[in-house]
């Protein structure tokens, strides 16, 4: 088994597909979570959804506590679901491992409550608040969007979105030439 997955880039159609619920958190799912966390760190990401590694199940991982000294405390969510969202909005400049070197200011709810299963299959809830942790609030919503086949670029105009995709394709092409 490889330690990490390959991160899929736009315009791969798997990124636009809806992931399916996980039936049970078994050893195979735990192994997937471990590899996803390793993949996230290897690519200097703060979050990663299963779609981004070509797996269509509802799993995301994130670590918004990592810093120059190394990894922090990763969070894993299986079958996450937003059960409440504030009307108040928050703006944050987002990027994505599937759209490398592309960034845009994205508006999202300033606070959400999420129910999910942790890496052991135990039911959990998390309340995010942009005033307390802006990155966590946007990261969890960004990764959950992936599970529904949405990218942060979908919040932009068609012109900006298409320009981003073209830039990513050019970057990928140039990397394969080297």
Image (tube, grey):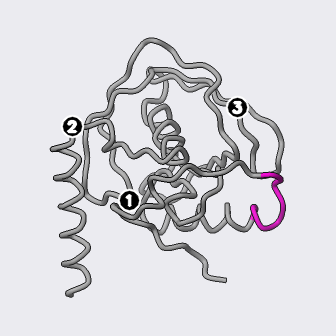
Residue pushed farthest bottom?
178
Q: Nearer the viewer, residue 74 or 92?
A: 92
Dot 3 falls on a residue whose secondary structure is strand
Q: In the displayed structure, would residue 10 be above or below residue 123?
A: below
Quadrant for residue 178, please give it: bottom left
Q: Which residues are magenta?
A: 23-30
Labels 2 & 3 near each other (Cβ < 8 A): no
Would residue 143 appear left or right of 60 to someone viewing this image? Answer: left
What distance separates the C-alpha of mark 3 from that of mark 1? 25 Å
Residue sitting at 70 percent across and 47 percent down?
A: 78
Q: Whole-percent x and y of residue 82?
A: 61, 28
Q: Nearer the viewer, mark 1 or mark 2?
A: 2
Would residue 26 appear left or right of 156 to someone viewing this image? Answer: right
Quadrant of the image containing the N terminus: bottom right
Which mark identifies residue 115? 3
Residue sitting at 45 percent across and 52 percent down?
A: 16
Q: Kindly identify which residue carries mark 1.
A: 98
What distance separates the C-alpha of mark 2 from that of mark 3? 31 Å
Quadrant for residue 128, please give it: top right
Dot 2 falls on a residue whose secondary structure is loop
Q: In the displayed structure, would residue 151 be above or below residue 125?
A: below
Q: In the displayed structure, would residue 173 be above or below residue 20?
A: below
């Amino acid at each position: 088994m490889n330690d990490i997955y390959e991160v899929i880039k736009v315009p791969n159609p798997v990124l636009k597909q809806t992931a399916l619920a996980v039936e049970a958190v078994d050893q195979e799912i735990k192994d997937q979570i471990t590899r996803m966390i390793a993949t996230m760190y290897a690519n200097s990401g703060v979050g990663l959804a299963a779609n981004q590694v070509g797996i269509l199940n509802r799993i995301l991982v994130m670590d918004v506590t990592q810093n120059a000294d190394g990894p922090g405390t990763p969070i894993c969510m299986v079958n996450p679901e937003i059960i409440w969202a504030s009307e108040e909005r928050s703006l944050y400049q987002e990027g994505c491992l599937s759209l490398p070197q592309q960034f845009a200011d994205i508006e999202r709810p300033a606070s959400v409550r999420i129910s999910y299963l942790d890496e052991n299959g135990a039911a959990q809830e998390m309340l995010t608040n942009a005033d307390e942790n802006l990155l966590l609030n946007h990261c969890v919503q960004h990764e959950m969007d992936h599970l529904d086949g949405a990218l942060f670029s979908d919040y932009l105009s068609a012109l900006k979105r298409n320009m981003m995709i073209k830039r990513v394709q050019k970057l990928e092409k140039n990397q394969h030439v080297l």
